[in-house]
Amino acid sequence: MIPLSWYLVLAAGLFIIGMVAFLIRRNVIMMLISLELMLNAVNIMLIAASHYLQDIRGQILAFFVMAGAAAGVAIGLALLIAAFRNKETAHMDEYTLLKG
Amino acid sequence: MLPEIFFSYFACAILGLALLTVTRRNLVHSVLWMLLLFLHIACLYLFLNAEFLAVIQVIVYAGAILVLFLFLVMLLNLREEHEARRFVHAWQGRVAVCLLILTVVVVSLHKVSVQPTGGYTIDFINQTGHTKVLGTALFNQYVLPFLMTALVLFVPMVAAIVIAMKERKR
Amino acid sequence: MELLLTIGKSVLFVAVVFAVTLLHVAYATYFERKVIGRMQGRIGPVEVGFRGLLQPFADMVKSLFKEDIIPNEADRPLFFLAPVIVVASVMTSLAVIPFFNNGSIANLNVGVLFIFAMASLAVYGIIVAGWSSNSKYAFLGGVRSAAQVISYEIAMGISLAGVFLMAGSLNLSDIVLAQREQPMGMFAVVQVVGFVVFVISAFAETNRTPFDLPEAETELVAGYLTEYSGFRYALFFLAEYISMYIMAALVALCYLGGWALPGFLTRALPFLELVPGIVWFLLKVYAFMFFYFWVRATLPRYRFDQLMAIGWKILIPVAVLNMVITAGVKRWLM
């Protein structure tokens, strides 16, 4: 039997990779992708904990996280399309229209 | 012994694929590495006796979300990433801080162990079928959050259409 | 020893399914050309072998020995990978289809969802093929395919939800067994709305006429296939026909009663029980394949905005309504 802590450490690693990428990549799509990575890390943690606690609540929560992730991506990509129309780029540093 | 070997493979593959995903210059390659990553995560869910969630992982993440990403990358024809700088200016500092957080988390987590407390034993789930167990819980105890999910999905749908719609000429 | 025997049996079964499917695909092309030929007042292939029966093999040899052209500006690894993704994901869904009683390679509890998952992976092959060819026509084909498959997968899943509700299971074998006592021994009668929605989405999902916009030859040369030649082109072709078989098998299993016969028929004519179930299954699958070809010979292609309007404004609302009514009927009237 694999100890629960292995899953937790794996999830932590995946979460940190997503977080680093979110902080250092400046492409909007890449940032959304790293958000997805973080959400997946959370899901791994929830489902593993649910399995080891023999409690279904974690899996229900993971289910809701998936729904939330889908909703978030839809909004994020729509915003990107709107932003792309004004400024022909997906690079975060180029969006400087508010600068005086 | 065998479970440990399988888990080690999947853990290494997941972390490696995640690194590959976030470091590619080409967004299409990045999305495809992420596809492979999601398939591995789905296999990990199978280990955790959550077959329904494993399939849903593939259908929702790989089948819908990633196709959406790929569709957008292609629609906007985002190839300029080749020339633009890949990382922010002083990325080393941010990476160091994140690694520090990782160390703290790993040190605090690596000894965690729990005692099973709930009634959903592995035998019970196998006998009833994972889909049925999950569905029964979802539609009885958690029916209100489930209905709220409908709202959570509906509002972004409307918002996405409104935001992405071209402004009508007056 | 016991374990080795089990593994050996499974491997043998997989090999048999694989080989038989490939043979069926070869003759599906022959069947299609004959059917469409007759419908257009021609006679179809007759030259190679008796009545043209060896034509599929001649085609295969031809495509194997053709020159393999790779565009200079193509993304080579992805260009090579695309046909493999399509074929592999389509072939994997064969694993959960029960060809007769207890006759599936893997009897999954989430069988139908597994087929959905694999179908949604197959679209990556098409998108990647379109993108990696680095050609305008191929690219447009890939984008169209992405939009089309996302849209129709929703309608398809929701229309099948009615069947899941009736059968109370996602396991394909259980769905087949649940149909025995239905009227006519099939869900297609009580779930007729879902059935129609599913059939239309199945055409869109496999990129067949009248929804073959990703490879519309009058607008896009050959769509995502434009830059492919020789063996890789043949792989895409193979995948298209296998996915047609998968969809036909899904229709046969979920709506037409699969390998089982309706209860009233076996009670009236008990000798029919002796016929192996795979005969009925194949009969239903081939009836649906014939329908595929019939539609191709009859209907013109839709425009892309019409395709999207049908998917989002008609099929999805109708499927949702069907699901809600089924759930209501099952909750209060049964």
Image (tube, rainbow, N blue to C red):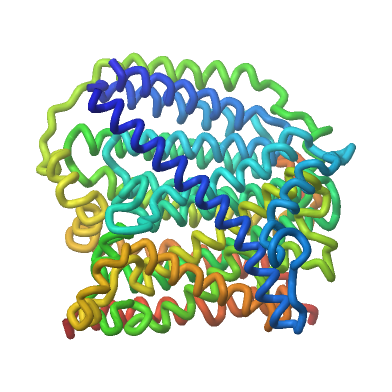
Foreground residue among C16 and B84: C16
Left or right, C60 with reference to C332: right
Image point 24% across, 58% down: which residue? Answer: B135
In the image, what residue occupies the spot 38% across and 74% down?
A: C256
Can residue A98 be seen in this snapshot? Answer: no
Residue C326 in the image, given as x and y percentages of width and height: 30, 79
Q: Is residue B22 above or below residue C42?
A: above
Give the residue at x 42% y 78%: C194
Is B148 positioned to the left or the right of C143 in the image?
Answer: left
Q: Measured along the vertical axis of the image, is residue B21 above or below residue C233? A: above
**Of residues A62 and C242, which is closer to you in this image?**
C242
Give percent across and percent down for residue C150.
57, 61
What x and y, as percent, mark residue C224? 76, 55
Q: Is residue B165 above or below residue A87?
A: below
Query: What quarter of the picture does the C terminus of chain C occupy?
Result: bottom left
Q: In the displayed structure, does residue C216 sit left or right of residue B24? A: right
* Name of the residue lying farthest toward the right: C72
Q: Residue at x 10, y 36 (%)?
A: B117
The image quadrant of residue C189 is: bottom left
Percent x, y for residue C61? 75, 46
Note whether residue B141 is visible.
Answer: yes
Comparing B109 with C182, the one in front is C182
User: What is the tally of numbered marks visible in this picture?
Assistant: 0
The N terminus of chain C appears in which quarter of the rendering? top left
